[in-house]
Image: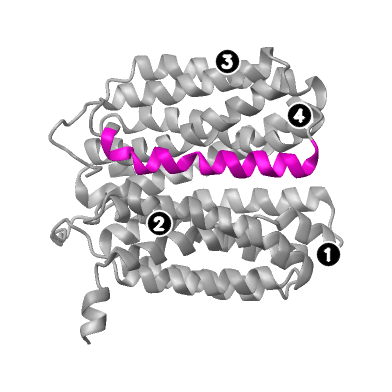
Amino acid sequence: MDLLKHYKNSYLSYFLMYFFFFFSLAFFSGFLSVYLMDQGFSASQVSFVVSCSFILSVIVQPFIGKLNDVYESKYVNGVLLLIAGLLGIVFMFLKNIYLIALVYSLVLSITNGTNPIIERMAVLSKFKYGSIRVWATIGYAIATIISGYIYKNIGSFSLYVFFAIGEFLCVIGLLGTQSILPPVEKTNKKISMSSVFKIKHIPYYLIIVCLFYGITNVHHLYLPAMLKQSGLPINNVSNVIFVSTLSEVPVTLLSHFYMNRFSNKQLLTSVFILLCIQFFTFSFLSSLIIQIMIVFLTKTVATMAFVMINLRIISTIVDNARQNTALSLVSACKSFASIVFQMLAGYLIDFTGYQMFYFVLFICSVIGMVLVFFFKVPTNKDLKVFH
């Protein structure tokens, strides 16, 4: 009992939650295209499976957020992640493409729905957000390295066994966490999507969210192919992606130094400036060395910073009782934007090439900066989200 008492609200519990959540995610989705093609499925069928997961995520994520606002977050997410782990085991036995799409979509919907809630749980811990969030980057990076070895030497099905084990260990960590906020008082008033959407600043902010995640997600998807076409060997492409992922580490570890110091508007502007620099480089500079350096300096820095900025903005403009619902609404918009931008990006690259593709992303980034300029988002100087 003493051991259990010491484990509750310990650093170990947050380490297990964060490390194995992203560790599992890398195992489940990192090799999907290779896994399905090795099973005899075509590239178009792989795209069908991924598209289904985004569509279902748009539907499911807001309901997960609502459940977290009504019930205890760690128990809701614990049950959901255990279900996801079991579905991962089921997934490796499926041979029908429609059943594969259904189960994959369910797992990704649960993962995408619980992700913003787990981000918020880290913010509400007694530990520094950066010291916890860094384990997400490390977990994902380690899983990325070893999953390829496991796939080749043990077998493709083993990835989903490791996924299930990782989900179980994540839940063990999750159950040991504890929020620094007092419990939200129970109320008979129903929490609805429409009530969150009517909150001042939310509709405008969701447009910015869609634009940001739309362009960054298609960039993430097509960056390896662009680097390969530019003449970089495929093994070096993997190394570039791996090193760029590690760029998140200083961004998260030092978050308490800058996230509470600048206004929400200044922080939003900074990430869109990074996007403009990034896509301007890919549009107008052909030097592969410069492009790789820009990837190291801006790619994951911008996306990781936006994750934290989103938590801060939602904490500023949404009351505590509806924040989980709002975060899930943001996550649903992310999935919706991914569907739209991925459909358009594929046609754009096929007919015009990567240079024009990145020029369009550059224009979208400039539009994002203009939207942020007119965004009258408040900043609560007394609110120290990143302690």
- Earlier along the polypeptide chain: callout 1 or callout 4? 1
Residue 199 x/y as whole percent: 26, 36
Residue 352 x/y as whole percent: 79, 20
Which quadrant is home to the N terminus?
Answer: bottom left
Which of the 4 quarters of the picture holds residue 238? Answer: top right
The mark that comes first in sequence, 4 or 2, is: 2
Q: Residue 7's quadrant in the figure?
A: bottom left
Are circles 4 and 3 on residues that touch, CB within 8 Å?
no
Q: Magenta part of the protein: which range?
A: 233-257
Q: Is mark 4 on a helix, strand or loop?
A: helix
Q: How far apart are marks 2 and 3 (CA)?
A: 34 Å
Magenta span contains residue 190: no
Residue 281 drawn above or below residue 257: above
Magenta-highlighted stretch: main secondary structure? Answer: helix
Give the labeled residue for mark 1.
39
Badge 4 density bin: few <14, some 14–19, many ≥20, Cα 10 Å? few
